[in-house]
Amino acid sequence: MDDPPARSEPAADRSFLRLEGVSKRFGDVTALNAVSLDVARGEILTLLGPSGGGKTTMLNLLAGFIEPDTGTIEIDHRIVNNVPPYRRDIGILFQNYALFPHMNVAANVGYGLKLRRLSRSQIRRRLDEVLALVHLTGYEQRKPRQLSGGQQQRVALARALAIAPKVLLLDEPFSALDKGLRASMQTELKDIQRSLGVTTIFVTHDQSEALSLSDRIAVLSEGSIRQIGTPAEIYVHPADRFVAGFVGNVNVLRGRLERLDGQNARVSLGATTLTVSAMRLGALAPGATVELFVRPEQLRLAEAIESTMCQGVVAAQAYQGTHIDFHVKTDAAISGRVLVRQAQVDAMSRWPIGSCVGIALTSKDAIAFPVESRPLT
Amino acid sequence: MGSGRAFRGILGIALVSAILCFLLLPALVVTIAAFNARAILSFPPDSLSWRWFAKALAYEDFRAGFRNGLIVSACASTLALLVGAAFAFVLDRYSFRLKRTLEAVLVAPLIIPHFTIGLGFLIVAAGLGATRGFAIVVACHLILILPFVLRSVYISLRNLDRRLELAAASLGASPLRVLMNVTIPLLAPGLVSGWLFAAILSFNEFTASLFVTSQRTQTLPVAMYNYVREYADPSMAALSVMYIVATATLLIIANSFFGLGKVLHVEDVR
């Protein structure tokens, strides 16, 4: 799970940014608990998790706004625990952009350059460069309040990039944008990040953003990293129930452990039996109930008479353009219903609401977890 | 239904007009009295005169009172701004034991009668054997106006987005630079309005000033009080009109720079 991302750059510096055993407490609350993490130079790593998971604390620690209680933070192989934010060379894109309202675009973007005592012509050149990068050439004299949300975000990005930061921190940057703009800004940001090769930490609670933007994702919950891996690893091989439930949609089905067979486990579900990895089951005795985590696209609808793994009744259909989401009531699911993603358009008329259907598994990638008393979050 | 609504509308307008007239009544009466050539209130305009204005401007006690008032209010409001801003900063940025107590002590002058504060200062000054100079007047006014300045700056600080300061720091600004380039420019409306409000309050303060001023240091309201005990001509009214005009001018200037809504905190700063 800790494999570095498959990247084409040669001899990548794999620990350009490094956290080792970093903990932070606020009063009685442990915000981060002995977190270790390596980020390669030029990588875009996402901190994904629910609010209160510790991702904001991590961001503040990296920026230098707070200091860790224990552990070390290294940037470019230098311990920066006690280095104040203004000596860290870190660019931050805040959720609300935090543009200086009393300065125009040029003054905002040039602020960090002025502090670095660059000459007027150097500042001018760099300003032109970064404004061209974010497609805002000609907006130098505008005040932030005269710009749209998307433009403000570009200015904020230009301001953060102008200082050629060692690390770029993105704090939920897209949450204030409307949906269409969000998608185009995501693409643009990723392009810019790739072309500059700037090491980037992206904080979000939005799993689809994380999956589409990241080289790797670190899933954080309750102050600990639950899993680090590429988006595909996280999605297909979640390390635990939390990750499985938090990243992507998931159906939880009730199965019965038939037998453990080394690496594999045989689990029966209704009329069918399937082989899944035994990795997360521990020393569970045969006959025990297990929970199978199955993605909506790993299921398909079938005629009720086929030897499908379980049966149910269609409760709702939702046309999504490229596919149709079927909500099917079935006793096999813990929550009483499953989400099935069906590609064919004729599926809507074939299985109308109220019809009895069979549910079949299309892949072998279901994941089995022992039953846990704690409710799934 | 239509006529009922129209009637209610007229009634509403009449009520509002009556309230506004009531609010402006003292100023109106005083203004008319100020221009009156004789000692009685009467139209028509041929009896109007500027003579009471001339007399008020020429009266030595008023001139001295005006000068003293300017000195005292400039010193007191500037000191109050420095002290108040510092305390507002501490209250906004830090949490500590006794924070509530500190807040309570700082706003206490709001509920202590002005004559109590004046009397207290008088006793302290007598006990210390100090002469009744400007220092004691300024000190007394400082206490009276501090809560207002503190409140003004504190609200501005509350409305200031901390992320602006963090952004500046991340771009390489030391704490001092953050303060100079971001915090103070963004707080400027709050600081100026706090200062202006304090200056006006100090300039107009009468009750406590009566206790702590001497013949040499008496401020304009005290001089006016002393005058009205002896004379009853309209020069007092003329002075009042000048007071109103001066204050209004000041507020209009402040409005053109910052917007009155922000200055008076009736509008959200952001």
Image: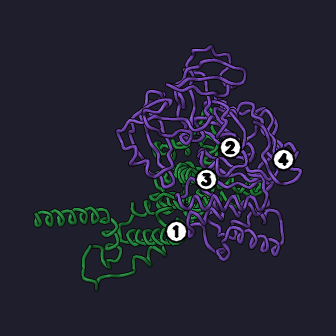
Chain colours: A purple, B green
Residue occupying the point 49% across, 30% down: A307
Residue for badge 1 = B254
Q: Nearer the viewer, mark 2 or mark 4?
A: 2
Marks 3 and 2 in Cβ contact (< 8 Å): no
Q: Using the image, determine if residue B128 lies above or below residue B15.
A: above
**Within-10-Å neighbours for mark 3: few <14, some 14–19, many 20+:** some
Q: Is residue A267 left or right of residue B264?
A: right
Q: Tell me the kind of residue under disc 4.
A: Phe
User: Which chain contains the residue that carries disc 2?
Assistant: A
Q: CA distance from mark 3 to mark 2?
A: 27 Å
Q: Nearer the viewer, mark 3 or mark 2?
A: 2
Residue for badge 4 = A16
Q: Nearer the viewer, mark 4 or mark 1?
A: 4
Q: Using the image, determine if residue B57 lies above or below residue A327.
A: below
Residue A232's tag is 2
User: Which chain contains the residue that carries disc 4?
Assistant: A
Of residues B158 and A137, the one nearer the viewer is A137
Q: Tell me the kind of residue under disc 3.
A: Gln
**Within-10-Å neighbours for mark 2: few <14, some 14–19, many 20+:** few
Q: CA distance from mark 4 to mark 3?
A: 25 Å
